Image (spheres, grey):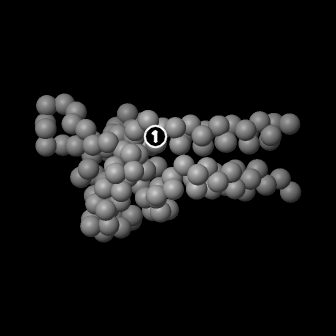
Amino acid sequence: MKTLYLRFLQIANAIRRESLLALDENSVALLNEITLKHYLGAPMTVSQAMNLATMGSQTTLHRRLDALREAGYIDQVFQGPDRRIKFLIPTALALAYFSKMNTAFASICKVSET
């Protein structure tokens, strides 16, 4: 039985433990959401993040956003004319983490081709 996905999970967990030391699983999930929205060209606003009820209460989400910002994984920036809206942008540190994950995924894909 090929277990490529399980092997990827094993590698991904090792990368996560190494790269995201200060974050719990729910904060990592929030970082994933923020980065995905950014990648798709529609950066998430702080208000949108605060309304992700499946990831916790607004108080919990606020703490997670603070933790991500303080750990250096996201920035809050203004874009456009409305200075009241803050957008959540992954930092170079977060993008380096996702690059490691991409490399791990690519290596597993190469193994599956052989």
Q: Is residue 71 left or right of residue 107?
A: left
Residue at image coords 58%, 56%: 17
Tell me if I can see residue 37 in this picture.
Answer: no
- Where, quadrant-wise, is the C terminus in this rendering? top right
Measuring from the top left, give residue 33's x and y in whole percent: 42, 50
Judging by the rendered image, the residue that carries numbered circle 1 is 93
Measuring from the top left, give residue 34's x and y in whole percent: 39, 46
Of 88 and 52, the residue lying toward us: 88
Q: Amino acid at mark 1?
A: Leu
Tell me if I can see residue 41 in this picture.
Answer: yes
- SS assignment at label 1: helix
Residue at image coords 22%, 43%: 86
* Position of 39 relative to 29 (above/below): above
* Position of 100 relative to 70 (above/below): above
Residue at image coords 40%, 38%: 91
Question: What is the count of numbered marks?
Answer: 1
- Residue 9 figure quarter: bottom right
Of 96 and 105, the residue lying toward us: 96
Of 110 and 70, the residue lying toward us: 70
Measuring from the top left, give residue 48's x and y in whole percent: 28, 52
- Residue 112 figure quarter: top right
Measuring from the top left, give residue 106's x and y in whole percent: 68, 37
Q: Is residue 50 left or right of residue 104?
A: left
